[in-house]
Image (cartoon, rainbow, N blue to C red):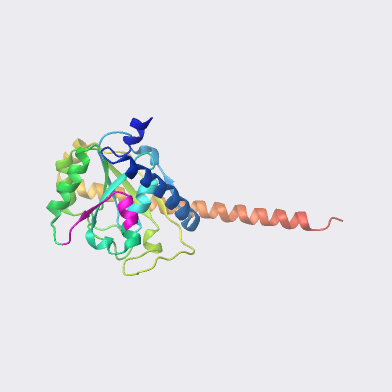
Amino acid sequence: MLSLFRQKNPGRSLGGLLFYELCYFIVRFSITLIYRFRVWGSGNLPLTGPVLVVANHQSHFDPIVAGMALPARHLNFVARSTLFTSKLFGALIKGLNSIPLRQGESDTAAIRITIDALKQQRVVLVFPEGSRTLDGQVHQFKRGAWLLMSRAKCPILPIGIHGCFEAFPRGTSIPTFFNRTIGICVGKPIAPETLLAMGEAEGLAMLQRLVDDLRRQAGEKLAHAGDAHRYRSRRQATAALAAASPTH
């Protein structure tokens, strides 16, 4: 049992694993309560071996919700050291396996750190856009992501994040806590040989389209879930009103 638990993030201390689990339940409960957080396709994550998770980048929430979307294993990600300036937020992302990258270090350093984590059979999250979106859309994937994928040679898991931009857009210091929803669609793993055979330009373009499609699907599913919720609420209110009305 303990060996299976350690497989969630090989090489991580037992204390670190338990802290991640604690953070997971607290954060998952909170974002589900506040943002009606939903996930589709979480079972697509391979249960063993290195995995490179590729996602669109909407806000500071992204690494956190991505981790909540893949509970079978613990997510790791590279974060700029400036994100640790806030003691509360810094402690949270550290507990969620953030790998600090000192300000001024090049993309080569980030690639090296990520590959080292993958060599330990871990799951690592990357954002190929390089920075948070300014308009909520998925923008061109950068060449550094291709260099990483070509060197890592491990399964690539695309995910699409919807709603984080509306909840916590770039340029704001405080997230919005009302009338916002967040959802994630997880795609099927892509074999590295399949992607690399396409070449850099075609491979990055295909991966960008796939992530964008997953983002759109998450938005559509959230809208459908919201419509269903409102319909049930109206039906329950109507039934309650009818039950309270006097009969003749």
Which quarter of the image is occupied by the C terminus? bottom right
Residue 233 image offset from top left, x and y in percent: 62, 55
Q: Quadrant of residue 122?
A: top left
Viewer-side residue, 46 vs 112:
112
Q: Residue at x 28, y 47 (%)?
A: 76
**In the rendered structure, which segment of residues is drawn in magenta?**
91-103
In this view, 150 is above or below 245: above
Residue 94 image offset from top left, x and y in percent: 30, 53
Q: Residue at x 14, y 61 (%)?
A: 104
In this view, 132 is above or below 7: below
Q: Residue at x 42, y 52 (%)?
A: 27
Which quarter of the image is occupied by the N terminus? top left
Q: Is residue 185 visible?
A: no
Viewer-side residue, 55 vs 201:
55
Residue 5 image offset from top left, x and y in percent: 36, 35
Q: Is residue 167 visible?
A: yes
Callout count = 0
Farthest residue in the right direction? 248
Viewer-side residue, 185 vs 10:
10
Viewer-side residue, 207 vs 66:
66
Q: Is residue 96 magenta?
A: yes
Farthest residue in the front direction? 15
In this view, 155 is above or below 131: above
Residue 52 horizontal side relative to residue 106, left or right:
right
Residue 54 horizontal side relative to residue 228, left or right:
left
